[in-house]
Image (tube, rainbow, N blue to C red):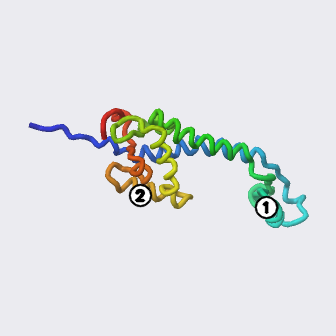
């Protein structure tokens, strides 16, 4: 008698990476647009000093931001203080998507598009507490912060393809069709 082979519902690592990229873009693109919309610019040919010296002096002011793009478009972009709208958007959208929505529904927009869900060990939505733990542990999973290698390597090499945040929160990321079944 042949027994059916049980397919591992957590073998969705490629989709997890794509979902994270989609969610990251949904948060970062509007934040960057809001930040840069508050920048002013000057053409470098009207500056009385070298563009880098201008930026160095401007940044010395408390909270001043300056970007020297002289070799790209011949300008320096600057803003007084940290652009609040972009920063506020980032810190509101991040927990809304990655904690509240994922905790209550089991998905983020990226996970919804890629057909995967976040679940607890019982196969149900993780809840806000577990989603918050997963989100907070991006501090470990996201290291080094320019490229989240810890989460990537741990997710590739562990049983259940879990990153550190999943292990601590006792969650799994599975195909959408596996939601509702214990893992």
The answer to whether one can see residue 36 in this image is yes
Q: Is residue 156 left or right of residue 100?
A: left
Residue found at the far left of this picture: 1
Q: Earlier in the sequence, mark 2 or mark 1?
A: 1
Q: Position of residue 82 (x, y in %)?
A: 74, 51
Q: Is residue 111 above or below residue 56?
A: above
- SS at badge 1: helix
Residue at numbered disc 1: 59
Q: Residue at x 29, y 43 (%)?
A: 8
Q: Estimate the x, y position of residue 129 in percent, counting from the top left.
A: 47, 42
Residue at image x 55%, y 39%? 97
Mark 1 surroundings: few (<14), some (14-19) or many (≥20) residues within 10 A: some
Between the residue at mark 2 and the residue at mark 1, the CA separation in whole angstroms equals: 37 Å
- In the picture, the disc for residue 46 is none
> Which numbered marker is on residue 153?
2
Dot 2 falls on a residue whose secondary structure is helix
**Residue 113 seen anywhere in this rendered image of the structure:** no
Q: Nearer the viewer, residue 74 or 120?
A: 120
Q: Nearer the viewer, residue 89 or 115?
A: 89
The relative height of residue 123 versus residue 163 in the rendered view (above or below) is above
């Amino acid at each position: 008698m042949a027994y059916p082979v049980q397919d591992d519902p957590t073998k969705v690592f490629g989709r997890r990476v794509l979902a994270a990229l989609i969610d990251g873009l949904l948060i970062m693109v509007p934040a960057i647009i809001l930040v840069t919309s508050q920048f002013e610019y000057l053409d470098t040919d009207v500056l009385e000093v070298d563009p880098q010296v201008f930026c160095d002096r401007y940044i010395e002011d408390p909270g001043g931001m300056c970007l020297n793009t002289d070799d790209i478009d011949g300008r320096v972009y600057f803003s007084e203080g940290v652009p609040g709208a972009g920063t506020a958007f980032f810190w509101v959208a991040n927990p809304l998507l990655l904690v509240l929505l994922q905790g209550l529904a089991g998905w983020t927009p990226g996970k919804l598009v890629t057909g995967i869900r976040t679940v607890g060990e019982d196969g149900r939505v993780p809840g806000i507490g577990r989603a918050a733990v997963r989100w907070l542990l991006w501090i470990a999973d996201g290291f080094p912060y320019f490229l989240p290698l810890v989460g990537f390597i741990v997710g590739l090499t562990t049983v259940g393809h879990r990153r550190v945040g999943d292990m601590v929160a006792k969650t799994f990321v599975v195909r959408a069709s596996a939601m509702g079944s214990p893992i």
